[in-house]
Image (tube, rainbow, N blue to C red):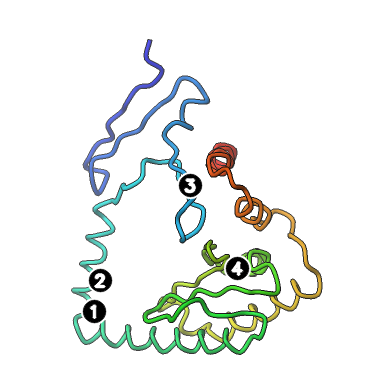
Amino acid sequence: MKSESIFEAPTEYLVESGFVLFCRIACDPIHQFVAVTEWSGGLYVSPTIAGSRPGGLIAGAWAAMISLGKEGYLENTKTIMEATKRIQKGIEEISELYVVGRPDMTIVAFGSNVLDIFEVNDLMTSKGWHLNALQRPNSIHICVTLQHVPVVEDFLTDLKESVETVKENPGPISGGLAPIYGAAGKMPDRGMVQDLLVDYMDGTC
């Protein structure tokens, strides 16, 4: 007997046709998880099949472009780029950090040679910032958007405070992901890292 069944959702309620997969056995879903351990963008795990891109996102981007127009888009881009440069400069002024590469657009990645950057990331998360953890080298990045423009100084202030906290009191915070990234980076068996990611996803979704 098959352990799963597929239900097609009414398309009039969705931006595209959707399906729901029901599993009879609790352990079945882990076989559809996607775990990537070698991506420089960090450890990645998803409970869904990789590559799904809802048409609604494309339609939303098109609608935003039409609404803003060319001039509006260029003006917003200029504002975001200026905010990005302010963030980059602020990071470069924190002696414990360094900027990875040469940011040409709106993503700024940064790491540290003197403290655990993932512990800094956990502290920033606790302050309400959602940054992305990277690897090779260990680092984190911020993707600057229009929402960041009015809070650039707040971001830099929180970042400085987080760096000082980790410098004075090194060690992971409760519930943080620094131990996972730290351990994963030292494991030579990448299959074990993949299993770790799948177990983490299985326990959280």
Residue 151 image offset from top left, x and y in percent:
53, 82
x 64%, y 68%: residue? 117
Seen in the picture, residue 82 relative to 131 is either above or below; the reply is below
Q: Which element is circle 2 on?
A: helix
Is 125 situated left or right of 114 in this image?
A: left
Q: In which quarter of the image is the N terminus?
A: top left
Q: How far apart are marks 1 and 4 (CA)?
A: 29 Å
Which quadrant would residue 102 be assigned to in this image? Answer: bottom left
Residue holding disc 4: 128
First of labels 1, 4 by sequence position = 1
Task: Please provide percent x and percent y for residue 100.
Answer: 50, 76
Residue in the foreground of this view, choosing between 94 and 176: 94
Q: Which amino acid does label 1 sit on?
A: Leu
Q: Mark 2 points at which residue?
A: 64
> As drawn, which residue projects farthest toward the front?
188
Could you say which quadrant of the image residue 130 lies in? Answer: bottom right
**57 vs 5: above or below:** below
Mark 1 falls on what kind of element?
helix
Q: Left or right of 192: which side holds 120? A: right
Element class at badge 3: strand
